[in-house]
Amino acid sequence: MNDRTALVTGANKGIGKEIARLLVAEGFTVYVGSRDAGRGEKAVEEIGGGARLLVLDVTDAEGIAAAAARIGTLDVLVNNAGVVVDDSRPTELTVDGLRRTYETNLFGVLAVTNAFLPALRRSPAPRIVNISSGTGSLTWGADPEREFAAFRGQGAAYRSGKAALNALTLYYGHALAEEGFKVNALAPGLRATDLHPRAALASAGDPAEAAEGAVRLALLADDGPTGGFFSWDGTPVPW
């Protein structure tokens, strides 16, 4: 009997919903994390199978604690919830815009991960996947040959938050390695979601394709990598 459990934050839509769907197909009981109960319940109904609603706002400390208290054992945590609050360049970026972006995309990951660590530690093979972005790669961002140079610093809050998330992923990987954890970050590529206007372009890819990359990291064998940053197709991404 397969009794593996997973939690995907921000799973009522987009890449998160597709990750939840694929994990259910793998036999997991999947907690669909959603700030909005109604939207979360709709996603659970559409996914079916082992999907379960977990009302979870990653910026609400009390709500995180209450959600964590409901789950005894957790095998996989996918920190997917993310926002674009202010897409400005740093010269126009407000402190409030930066802070609100970090609250979800960085601080929320820390808060949720630490709250669910007791449940993850009860798993024989705990896995954590942080949904990052290729735009958070400082190496790629500094390369004049890559498309990110054309942004001229646009999206500074989102991109810098993902760079910080990559660093946090590395440090979690180091801190938890001796306990058998595998902690990795995924660059999903530009996908057709409502995250930001560029995601509405015709060139945006299928969220399900990115979800396959996340599930690959969620199902890593014991000899798999930890503290890494990978593209949706499995290739390493430079920090």
Image (spheres, rainbow, N blue to C red):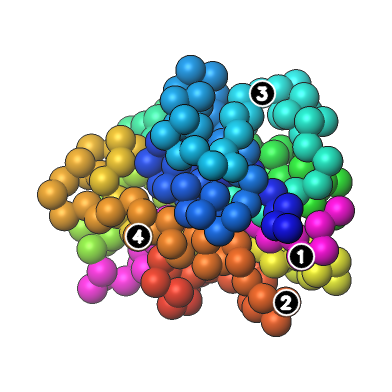
Neighbour tally class for label 2: few under 14, some 14-19, many 20 plus, Cα within 10 Å: few
- Residues under labels 3 and 1: Cα distance? 28 Å
Question: Residue at left 50%, top 32%?
Answer: 44
Task: State the SS at label 2.
Answer: loop
> How far across and down, in percent of the image, does residue 53 sit?
59, 29
Q: CA distance from mark 1 to mark 2?
A: 7 Å
- Residue 127, how many percent across, how many down? 69, 60
Query: Which sits earlier in the primary sequence, circle 1 or circle 2?
Result: 1
Which residue corresponds to mark 3? 60
Quadrant housing residue 183: bottom right
Mark 2 to mark 3: distance in Å? Answer: 33 Å
Q: Nearer the viewer, mark 3 or mark 1?
A: 1
Q: Work out whether 63 lies above or below 135.
A: above
Which element is circle 4 on? helix
**Label whose residue precedes the other's in the sequence (4 or 1):** 1
Frontmost of labels 2 and 3 is 2
- Which residue is drawn at the image coordinates 86% and 46% (left, top)? 118
Residue tagged 1: 125
Which amino acid, by three-letter code, is at mark 2? Answer: Asp
Give the residue drawn at x 51%, y 46%.
20
Distance, label 4 to label 1, CA atoms, is 25 Å
Residue 159 tag number: none
Residue linked to disc 2:
222
Residue visible at 30% across and 35% down in the picture: 194
Q: Amino acid at mark 1?
A: Ala
Q: Earlier in the sequence, mark 2 or mark 3?
A: 3
* Residue 61 falls within the magenta-colored stretch: no
Q: Which amino acid does the dot numbered 4 rest on?
A: Glu
Residue 123 drawn above or below residue 60: below
